[in-house]
Image (cartoon, rainbow, N blue to C red):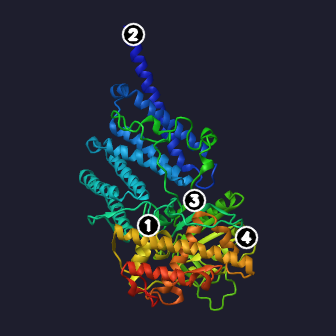
Amino acid sequence: MVKMESTEEQDRKLVLEFCHLLEKSKQLFNGLRDLPQYGHRQWQAYFGRTFDVYTKLWKFQQQHRMVLDSKYGLKRWQIGEIASKIGQLYYHYYLRTSETNYLNEAYQFYAAIRGRAYYSRAAKEDRPDLMVKKLRYYARFIVVCLLLKKMKLVRELVTELEKQIQEYTNTYEPEDHLEWSLVLEEIKGFIKAEAAVAVLHADSNPIILSHSGSGSRLSPLTTPPCERSPHMTLSLQEILIVGSACEQAKFSELTMDMFRMLQTLEREPTESATNPLSMSHGLHGHDASPAASRIPPYGVPGSKGFMENGRRDCRDNPHKYLLYKPSISQLLVFLASGFKELPLGGALLLYMSADGCFSTTKHPEDYGYELGGLGTSVKRDSVDGGGLSCRGKSYKENHCLYPGDLYPFTRRPMFIIIDSDNSFVFQHIPRYFGQPLVILMSPQDVPPAFQADVQHHGSLFTLFLHSPLTALCYICNVGDVPIHHWERCQTYVDRFITEASRLVTRCRIDEIEQGIGFIDSSYVQFFGDDFLRTLILRFVFCDVVLRLHRGFRGRHMRPRCEPQLPANELLEHPSLSHIIFQLASALDVRNHFSEGPECD
């Protein structure tokens, strides 16, 4: 009898310990939203404590599942909720660190929830709040799959989400059913816009390419070659990606331009089979869901032990902030934070996709503020006090980023990309402090045939920077390409990038040997960084293609850069034009381009 009481007492203590861990985990998780979104170190310790508690909670429910089932009444959806929270932790840690391996970790947990059907009985619980949790899980899983380019799975998840929304609406007639319908339409619109050009398998089914230079993240296979020199001293360390275009396809506060640019500025995630963070160990065992080894046993992201293991020291990707329609004050605060965090030899990149704020000043004297700028958090149809229309204003708009706002940040090396119909106003930013500064500016207009699509489906300029071959196909009305043909065409793009890289290096050598300043030293200093070199060379590709394309006539339909890149020695070099003509012939779109030499 005493033994029986002892067992019951042990079970009671186990349940109490589980309740304590569950409550503590909820408190810590809820506290994440109060952490500062900028700065590197203010939040790491808190994330570490949160991961630590979830590690204990996850292992605890695995080790004592039978007791918790019988004495606590643990349900499968509750296990799914814990797994979902861990997935969210990894996703948010990815957002804060820019390390794509954490994106894989989030995916593993979300995939296990679906594979183990943890939410399968949610509808039978007669709890609308539980159904909402299930819908939110689907939305988060879709975001992670989009970022990992798992498009086949994305389409399956969207179909499942649509059924779940229908079931939720029919069962509860909730007040938020219209909101969920809008979420669904937003996802579908985003997927449609993302597929600018379909690459087809032999069976004519679309496929997603991950390592072919088709717009994927940077990998050893897609990193442009470079002849190194001692002058290539800078590395990209801090990035600010801002999406404020009013009518562009978006999902989960990611516009299409932001979605493409963030992938362009990341490396392909590595396989994590040998990583202690990996979920691959134990997934095929009993019905337990992700194994305890999924969560780091030796120290967690953000904790002191984790830092001492050196994983942060070998960071693959520059740190970045993602801002969707920020206020001007938010934008400047995040810029200042990135500026503050720059190490010696580091460079700051600002990418901004936004609608123009235009000035009607006839004789501007102050190029910093009298030529207009970019709308940040303003909607076109907004007319209330703090948010006026993006267009046609003859005075200084509160929610507008002006070129002059960026002057203080040029005290450190800065690389600026402006994608807007008012981009050229940023070409006048002075180099007061003598630091390296490069500004890449999109065309301010596109031919009428592309205007509607570009406005909603994402900017053409950003598409060139993300996937040069996709952009070229798009402006030549090539909607789909067989995989074998795509790979052949990609070799032409690779040849172009290699040749452009050689020409940039040649310009620098000629400058040193002959004393002729063919190329500004800012480009050379940035050229040693893989990401910045990729952007510079894809900009060259964009400029050459649009210069030769019959449909893009007029200087406002081509990009600009400051300092200017040499024309004869680079942008109009015959070897680059020849490769474009060869590529056009391979795609059978030679008629879209101006007259040039016949290509084999």
Which-is-in-front pick, marks 4 and 3?
A: 4
Is residue 177 shown left or right of residue 563?
left
Q: CA distance from mark 2 to mark 1?
A: 67 Å
Is residue 583 shown left or right of residue 510?
left
Marks 2/1 in contact by CB < 8 Å: the verdict is no
* Residue type pointed to by label 4: Gln
Which-is-in-front pick, marks 4 and 1?
A: 1
Marks 4/1 in contact by CB < 8 Å: the verdict is no
Residue in the image at 51% along x and 78% along y: 542
* Residue type pointed to by label 3: Lys
- Ranked by sequence position, the earlier of labels 3 and 2 is 2
Residue in the image at 52% along x and 54% along y: 95
Is residue 76 shown left or right of residue 90?
left
Q: Which mark is residue 214?
A: 1
Residue identifier under label 3? 320
Q: CA distance from mark 3 to mark 2?
A: 58 Å
- Ranked by sequence position, the earlier of labels 4 and 3 is 3
Q: Which mark is residue 435?
A: 4
Looking at the image, is 134 positioned above or below residue 76? below
**Under tag 2, what secondary structure?**
helix
Q: Residue 467 placed where, x, y %?
A: 46, 69
Looking at the image, is 247 positioned above or below residue 184? below
Marks 4/3 in contact by CB < 8 Å: the verdict is no
